[in-house]
């Protein structure tokens, strides 16, 4: 169904594409093959899988994961990591809920406050790790705990029901697809353009490749690092809004462990944990693969333990395939 | 030791080693028990290669070795060690987080079923330390808490098993204070008394006078002299190291120097760079000579703001007016670049290039503002600029999209040059710009340097290749132990005088900063320490 197919797939491989583009399309092709293979497999295993409902539900699950993965892609490209996105998601949702319920603010203003919360959290992570030259793993691990604590504080440790005031973001819109999904796809496209076509994107990739070389070329890596984490926080805040819009509530336990799903999606998309290499579009494929896998396993009635075992195996296998492909490409390059 | 004094411990016969080209050829040497043989020569003369061959790190391409009368063909470093030939390398091989005792006995920790017997460990270690007179080190101390000199001694102790017959010391005093050095020499005397044969690699001539029995001089991979150390004058050794047949490009005229563009006063950072005064003029190339570790790279990094200076000031001039001033050095490279300074780094792979990325990306990195509007890259403009610079510098490549990791060293260096043509700089600092660059590309780079000076830029070039400096430069400054000890004008230098200045320090490390000589840049002078060093 057209619903689950992102617009980018329509750029099908052109035989006479220039070599740089051919490599890019090769990646798309590989990930598309995995995706199609999974859909065919699940379709064969369950007669209900290939239904409109499955795809609409997948499409509605995706936005929060996708926008966080967009930010995480940038973080991984600068050879960092942000473990706090799940907690930031929860705190942003909590602040929005509190703004509506307790402080009686208008919904747009409350949403803005939620986004600002995410932005501040991300900025803190980035600034602390840059100022004291700490690994972002450590700083964001601390933020994961502290921000989660903040979410409990704001919600008084209970799920806050907001009602349908903010459900518009998640409501079906074009052919059952939500505003949030469209927003996520737009963000993916914009982020890919930022990464490949702007000075900022060039600097991000450069810092991940060789930070010292960038410094000696006259580019200060520090503000760029902070901005990347700040944007990731902002996007985690947006994910918080999306999630609470869907659930019409702010749950202090929202997004527990989701950072690992986000990182898995980015890594399946071929972004290197060592930095310097990555693509937002490929990350989106990673998100689709995870979402389809989850929905498919649920549809065929897999038990919770076997779901987790299979998901774990798929992540590792996907990365092995990508690593081998990359290594072959490097050898050809030499 | 088992070899009688009459038979030599180690014999090298016509040893040669080729990498791309021969780096060592026809070296024959005899080493007696209980002697210290000094191995000396210029940077790149083959000293390290020869030591590595002796201790099994690299196999020789030609020639044989004999150890105690038996054929000696070590397959690896471990193999050489088993036969009693050991080496203390310049880079310390100690595990910092473990104790002295654990480091000494790392490959044979006394244990029972895997559990380490600490009492025995410390007893064994203490005995080993005592053997070289290091009674004052507690074997339980962590290596990271020792001074660099003591670490060096531990490294030596580790290489002093009872069966050690030959010990190679590669620049052992490079990091030592004078006090630690004299302590080391006492230990070397003890080893000699025990009959260990020592190969002492160094280019600090003063030390050799103190410690060596004989000296072997390498030049361009060949052994040019072996003689008893007693009575050898330093000037003779320098002459042997350099040889006579040089002065190829001596003929060129001095470029016409314009106004001063960059001025540094009293620039320094810790012990690496001390009180350097420097002026760079438009349209000329100043060279910077000196031994590895003399502070050349460190000085260039200060001038570029890659490291922060502790003291001293830098200023840039244009038309006699000061345009940029950094009273305590640059705060960052960005500041220096904005002032119009560029740097071609010593190690282009780790500090210069984004290796997996394209020529285009690497070329335009120095000024992304020039190829963007409102933060968006103008791709056609970028391609045009990259294509023009690639053609101008004759970078050999399939396209500007080729990753720089796939280019040869010379072409990689051209890309780094291109970067500083993309962003116009007034002063370009070049640190070993032709290292690992083939002859053809080297000529292209030299031609580009001439274009740059014609365009009125001021260049500062660090090189270990004296001939290159003498061919390209209008002035050559010589660094030694962090100081700019002499500046020679074109026509006033000779390879001998440059080397003499480079070797002049040694005693300068004795920390008498108040008497630091600070030569007037306009007035070349041979440092007085040379005269003292010649007559011990």
Image: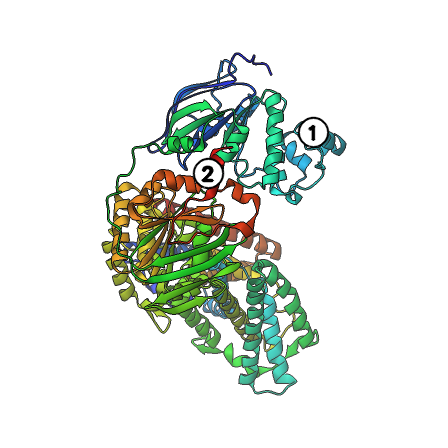
Residue at 59%, 23% in the rendered image? B192
Can residue B204 be seen at all in this image of the molecule?
A: no
Q: Mark 2 lies on which chain?
A: B
Does B368 sit above or below residue B159? below
Mark 2 touching mark 1, by CB under 8 A?
no
- Would residue B29 be seen by someone viewing this image from the given angle? yes
Q: Position of residue B433 (x, y in %)?
A: 35, 48
Residue B225 falls in image quadrant: top left
Q: Nearer the viewer, residue B163 or A65?
A: B163
Q: Quadrant of the C terminus of chain A?
A: top left
Closer to the camera in the image, A7 or B163: B163
Tell me residue A286's x, y (percent).
46, 59
Mark 1, secondary structure of its residue: helix
Give the SS element for disc 2.
helix
User: Residue A167 — which label?
Assistant: none
Q: Nearer the viewer, residue B407 or B289?
A: B289
Dot 1: chain letter = B
| Viewer-proximal residue among A163 and A94 | A94
Q: Which of marks 2 and 1 is in front?
A: 2
Residue occupying image coordinates x 49% and y 33%: B535
From the top left corner, tell me how far across and down residue A203 is, in percent.
Answer: 42, 63
Q: Residue furthest right?
A: B119
Q: In which quarter of the image is residue B438?
A: top left
Q: From this view, report whether residue B67 is shown above or below residue A197.
A: above
Q: Mark 2 points at which residue?
A: B531
Q: How crowded is mark 2: few (under 14 residues within 10 Å), some or many (20 or more)?
A: some
Label 1: which residue?
Answer: B130
Q: Residues within 10 Å of mark 1 (few under 14, many from 20)?
A: some
Residue A85 in the figure: left or right of residue B344: right
- Answer above or below: position of A102 versus B423: below
When the figure is inspected, residue B130 is found, relative to residue A205, above or below; the finding is above
Instruction: Tell me which numbered mark, 2 or 1, is placed earlier along the sequence.
Output: 1
């Amino acid at each position: 169904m057209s619903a689950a197919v992102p617009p980018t797939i329509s750029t099908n491989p052109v035989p006479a594409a220039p070599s740089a583009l051919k490599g890019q399309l090769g990646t798309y092709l590989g990930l598309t093959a995995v995706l199609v293979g999974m859909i065919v497999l699940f379709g064969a295993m369950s007669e209900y899988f290939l239904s409109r409902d499955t795809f609409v539900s997948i499409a509605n699950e995706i936005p929060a994961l996708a926008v966080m993965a967009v930010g995480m892609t940038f973080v991984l490209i600068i050879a960092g990591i942000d473990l706090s996105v799940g907690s930031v998601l929860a705190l942003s949702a909590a602040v929005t809920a509190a703004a509506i319920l307790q402080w009686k603010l208008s919904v747009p203003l409350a949403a803005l406050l939620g986004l600002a919360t995410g932005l501040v959290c991300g900025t803190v992570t980035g600034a602390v790790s840059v100022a004291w030259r700490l690994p972002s793993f450590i700083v964001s691990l601390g933020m994961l705990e502290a921000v989660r604590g903040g979410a409990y504080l704001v919600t008084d440790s209970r799920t806050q029901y907001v009602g349908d005031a903010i459900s518009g973001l998640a409501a079906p819109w074009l052919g059952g697809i939500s505003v949030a999904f469209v927003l996520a796809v737009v963000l993916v496209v914009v982020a890919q353009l930022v990464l490949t076509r702007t000075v900022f994107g060039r600097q991000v990739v450069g810092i991940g490749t060789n930070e010292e070389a960038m410094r000696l070329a006259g580019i200060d890596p520090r503000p760029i690092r902070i901005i990347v984490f700040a944007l990731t926080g902002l996007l985690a805040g947006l994910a918080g809004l999306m999630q609470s819009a869907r659930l019409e509530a702010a749950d202090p336990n929202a997004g527990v462990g989701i950072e690992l799903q986000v990182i898995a999606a980015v890594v399946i998309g071929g972004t290197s944990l060592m930095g310097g290499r990555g693509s937002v579009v490929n990350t989106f494929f990673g998100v689709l693969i995870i979402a389809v896998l989850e929905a498919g396993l649920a549809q065929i009635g897999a038990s919770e333990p076997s779901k987790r075992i299979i998901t774990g195996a798929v992540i590792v296998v996907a990365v092995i395939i990508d690593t081998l492909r990359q290594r072959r490409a490097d050898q050809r390059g030499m | 030791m088992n070899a009688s004094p009459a038979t030599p411990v180690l014999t090298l016969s016509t040893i040669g080693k080729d990498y791309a080209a021969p780096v060592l050829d026809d070296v024959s040497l005899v080493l007696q028990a209980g002697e210290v043989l000094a191995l000396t020569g210029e940077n790149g003369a083959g000293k390290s290669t020869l030591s590595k061959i002796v201790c099994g790190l690299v196999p020789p391409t030609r020639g044989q070795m004999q150890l105690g009368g038996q054929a000696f063909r070590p397959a690896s470093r471990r193999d050489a060690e088993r036969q009693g030939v050991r080496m203390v390398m310049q880079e310390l091989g100690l595990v910092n987080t473990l104790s002295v005792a654990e480091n000494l006995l790392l490959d044979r920790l006394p244990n029972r079923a895997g559990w380490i017997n600490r009492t025995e460990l410390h007893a064994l270690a203490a005995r080993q330390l005592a053997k070289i007179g290091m009674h004052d080190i507690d074997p339980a101390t962590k290596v990271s808490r020792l001074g660099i000199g003591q670490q060096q001694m531990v490294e030596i102790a580790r290489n002093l098993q009872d069966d050690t017959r030959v010990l190679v010391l590669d620049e052992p005093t490079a990091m030592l204070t004078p006090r630690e050095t004299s302590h080391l020499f006492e230990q070397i005397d003890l080893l000699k008394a025990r009959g260990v044969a020592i190969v002492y690699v160094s280019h600090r001539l003063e030390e050799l006078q103190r410690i060596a029995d004989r000296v072997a001089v390498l030049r361009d991979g060949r052994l040019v002299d072996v003689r008893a150390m007693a009575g050898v004058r330093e000037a003779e050794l320098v002459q042997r190291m350099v040889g006579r047949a040089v002065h190829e490009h001596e003929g060129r005229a001095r470029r016409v120097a314009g106004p001063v563009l960059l001025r540094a006063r009293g620039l320094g950072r810790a012990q690496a760079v001390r009180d350097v005064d420097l002026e760079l003029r438009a349209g000329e190339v100043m060279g910077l000579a000196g031994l590895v570790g003399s502070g050349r790279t460190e000085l260039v990094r200060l001038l570029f703001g890659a490291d922060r200076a502790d003291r001293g000031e830098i200023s840039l001039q244009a038309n006699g007016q000061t345009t940029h001033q950094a009273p305590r050095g640059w705060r960052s490279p960005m500041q220096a670049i904005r002032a119009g300074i560029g740097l071609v780094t010593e190690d282009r792979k780790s500090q210069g290039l984004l290796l997996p990325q394209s020529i285009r990306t690497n070329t335009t990195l120095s000024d992304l503002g020039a190829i963007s509007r409102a933060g968006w890259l103008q791709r056609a403009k970028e391609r045009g600029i990259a294509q023009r610079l690639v053609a101008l510098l004759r970078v050999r490549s399939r396209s500007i999209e080729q990753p720089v990791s796939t280019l040869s060293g010379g072409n990689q260096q051209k890309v780094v040059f291109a970067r500083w043509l993309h962003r116009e700089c007034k002063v370009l600092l070049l640190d070993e710009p032709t290292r690992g660059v083939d002859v053809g590309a080297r000529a292209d780079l030299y031609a580009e340097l001439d274009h740059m000076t014609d365009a009125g830029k001021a260049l500062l070039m660090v090189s270990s290749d004296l001939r290159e400096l003498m061919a390209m430069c209008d002035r050559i400054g010589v660094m030694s132990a962090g100081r700019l000890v002499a500046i020679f004008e074109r026509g006033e230098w000779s390879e001998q005088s440059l080397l003499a200045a480079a070797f002049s320090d040694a005693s300068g490390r004795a920390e008498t900063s108040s008497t630091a000589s600070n030569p007037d840049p306009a007035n070349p002078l041979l440092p007085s320490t040379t005269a003292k060093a010649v007559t011990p």
